[in-house]
Amino acid sequence: MAILDMKKCTIVGYGADKQKLIKTLHKSCIFEVVKSDELDNATYKEETKSRDEVNTRLAKLSFAFDFLKVQKRTGDRIIKDNSKKKNIKKGKVVAINYKKPKKQLIQTPVYIDYNDFMNLPNKADSVFSKISELEQINLRLQEIKTNEIKINNQIEQLKVYEKVDIPFSEVKSTENAVMMLGTIPKEKVEALKNVLNDYEGMYTEVIESECKLQAVFVAMHREIKDDAMLRLSTECDFVRCSYNFDMTAKDKIVELQNTLKDNEKEKVQLLDKSLDYLKYEDDFKQMYDYYSFESQKLTAEEGMLNTTSAFVVEGWIPAEQQAKFEEELNKTSEYLFVEFRDPLDTEVPPTLCKNNKLVEPFEAVTNMYAAPLPTEFDPNPLMAFFFFVFFGFMVSDAAYGLLLAVGAMAFYLLSKPAKGKGKMILLIFFGGISTFIWGMIFGGWFGETWHPLVPSLVPMENPMNVLILALGLGVIHIMYGMAINGVQLIKRKKYIESIVETWDWFFIYIGLFMLAGNMLLKLNNNGLKITGLVFLVIGLVTLLVLGGYGKKGFGRVFGGVSRLYDIVNFMSDVLSYSRLFGLGLATGIVGMVFNQIGMVLVDLLSFNWFGMAIGWIFAIAVMVVGHLFNLGINTLGAYVHDCRLQYIEFYGKFYQGGGHLFKPLGSQIKYNNIRM
């Protein structure tokens, strides 16, 4: 249970063997390629053309996933709307051939044989031709969307003229008269009357509508046109109509609305056509994984040094895999030169943790925070125990624990996750076991107190005992983290820092706990009191004397005094563990409330045997839904708060992190698992 040692591996070979070597590196899945150090007479090769092709193909595949996802969501919505009774009665059912696929509750991993994976380029033309067809469908849908926007805007503009009962083309000027249609704002109608009163050879008619703009018919003598038009535009905000259709506005609106209906029909046809491509989604996923690997391979090749006839590749492998790896290289080519060495002080190798089956699932918690550096120890075994304990404490219901443990293990066995995956499911499984244990200790079963086997060790009826236990666990957790830090400082030969940052605080806190316990529990034990004082004095004196170590001037003298404030920080950290008590209590109370609601329903309907039966049916339904909700929300809360306690209160005391996880060539693919 540790971070595996890494070896830096350098491989030199003939250019003709490069692709065979890359294949071996991929199949072995234990070699992380890094950029080789520069050498004389050797250069890096930029695979610009190949990189552009791979990126283009990955972009096309990503488009296909995103487009089909949107189309599928649209198809699901249409099916849902079609099933509504009100739409069926009104005849608003949209004819669509798409049938919503049954959603699989448990997704099993998808495997592909290595040889089949490497032969996927043979299917590339077929796959990308289908994606091109999807691109054409998408292009047509975008054209329709753009056209619909234009049509809707035009309909809005034509509504102003909807009550004009002559075609636009019939509004024509004559030799002596100018006639036109236009619009003015509704509030400019009075201004129009003023303009009309100033001209004898002018006629206007306002065609009223509910629009903000009003249609206006204007007829005037040609002699006054220029002057009248200037006043109409400046005083009335008159805008001349630009339409010249051989039909009325009302007829044109109907025509445009019919076009919209035709567009809707075409959109449904295109939707149906695009959804038919869902059957190729597995092919798209395989191809995406292949080109993801190609991208990783190009990155590896671009980091290799090349001469006219040879190449150099460097990378990291776990030290324990060296013999096996050398054997694989010998099978690849007899003309490969291989050298292994330990990391230099200036190098940071990748991190690969190796833990037993009990600790391995908890690696996900640490990796979410930060992967450990290879130079520090693996914190997972230390953290796993406390994560396990705190999770169950915060849910603290034995029945919930059984549901979590059985459900998670059943899900794990049915889904059969690929090697190295499914850690989160196992984490929930262990959390369920912890919850069951704490539920037995507290006596909580579905929100009720019950002790089927043994009396409750810490009954929830005495909440102060539970709070004290939670804070006590917090003290142990924090001081354990401090002790780890102290040991690390000693290993780095920082003895004074180890005393100041860790061990003198142990004396201070132990002394304080002895004195506080003697007083609060009213023990009146002089021996305990004196021992506590001795511990406290030793710790304080040591802190004051050594607290200014490494500082200058007044800091050297008074540095220890400022460190006394850490007592407040310690108490603040300890109070953080009250969340263990709070969440555990909340789980029990919420569960109890749902039970009481169910029993109230039974009591309300217990007027006869039939009513009682109905009452129990409703009560069971309420309790099942309520307890499932309570289990789900508190499991999520326990996970989040447990992570917070590990990250802030525990790792904050000693853990550095900042490493990067070991990623062998070809391991970063998304959808499939390669069977070597």
Image (cartoon, rainbow, N blue to C red):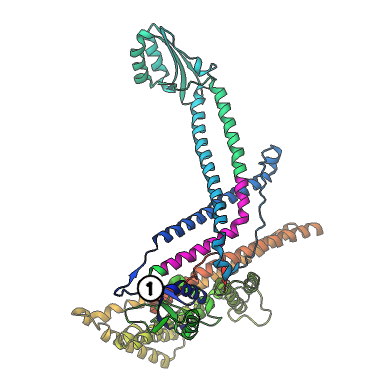
Classify the position of the C terminus by image quarter: bottom right
Q: In the rendered image, which quarter is residue 422 located in?
A: bottom right
Q: Pointer 1: what residue? A: 309
* Residue in the image at 47% along x and 65% along y: 294
Q: Label 1: few (<14), some or many (≥20) within 10 Å?
A: few
Measuring from the top left, give residue 452's x and y in whole percent. 69, 79
Between 181 and 214, the residue placed more toward the observer is 181
Residue at the extreme right of the image, as rendered? 609
Question: Is residue 516 within the magenta segment?
Answer: no
Q: In the rendered image, which quarter is residue 622 located in?
A: bottom right
Measuring from the top left, give residue 584's x and y in whole percent. 55, 71
- Specify the segment rendered in magenta: 271-300
Q: In the rendered image, which quarter is residue 429 located in?
A: bottom right
The answer to whether any part of residue 413 appears in the image is yes
The reply, left or right, for residue 353 in relation to residue 418 is left
Q: Is residue 524 above or below residue 187?
A: below
* Residue in the image at 46% along x and 60% along y: 54
Secondary structure found at label 1: loop
